[in-house]
Image (tube, rainbow, N blue to C red):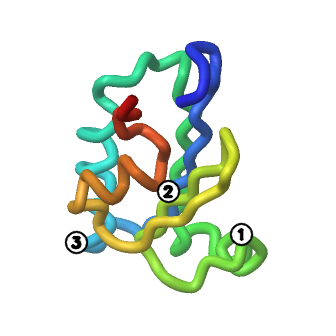
Amino acid sequence: MATTDTVLRLRLYVAGSAPNSARARENLAALCRGLAPERLDLEVVDVLREPMRALEDRVFVTPLLCKLAPPPEARVVGDLSDHAQVRRALGLEEVEP
């Protein structure tokens, strides 16, 4: 992330306890383990409980991880098992000199 005081704002859309949604939660938890809790703002939206929210947010497939801040915004669809791809999308990869 850009600076040490930057908060990573994420929103994960899931469909209840469907297998892919459960894996996405587990994989995201593993990816975020190394982040300080005060640097992470994570919201999980269950589209089965909040279908109108999903429509308003233009979510048509789950699981879907949205990086809301810091810019640029990003979206990753799937169970988040490709940790390298997710880290790149979130801007968490190590920067090479």
Task: Give the mark nearest the N terminus, 3 or 1.
Answer: 3
- Crowd rating for badge 3 (residues with CA inside 10 Å; few <14, some 14–19, many 20+): few
Residue that label 3 marks: 19
Where is residue 19? Give x, y as percent: 22, 72
* Label 1 – label 2 distance at C-alpha: 13 Å
Outermost residue toward the right? 56
Tell me the amino acid under the disc marked 2: Leu
Where is residue 65? Give x, y as percent: 48, 60
Where is residue 85? Give x, y as percent: 32, 59
Q: Secondary structure at mark 2?
A: strand
Residue that label 1 marks: 53
Numbered disc total: 3
Q: Which mark is residue 12?
A: 2
Picture layout, residue 20 above or below residue 83: below
Q: Nearer the viewer, mark 3 or mark 2?
A: 2
* Label 3 – label 1 distance at C-alpha: 22 Å
- Crowd rating for badge 2 (residues with CA inside 10 Å; few <14, some 14–19, many 20+): many
Task: Give the mark nearest the N terminus, 3 or 2.
Answer: 2
The one of 69 and 45 positioned closer to us in this rendering:
69
Where does the C terminus fall, quadrant-wise? top left
Tell me the amino acid under the disc marked 3: Pro
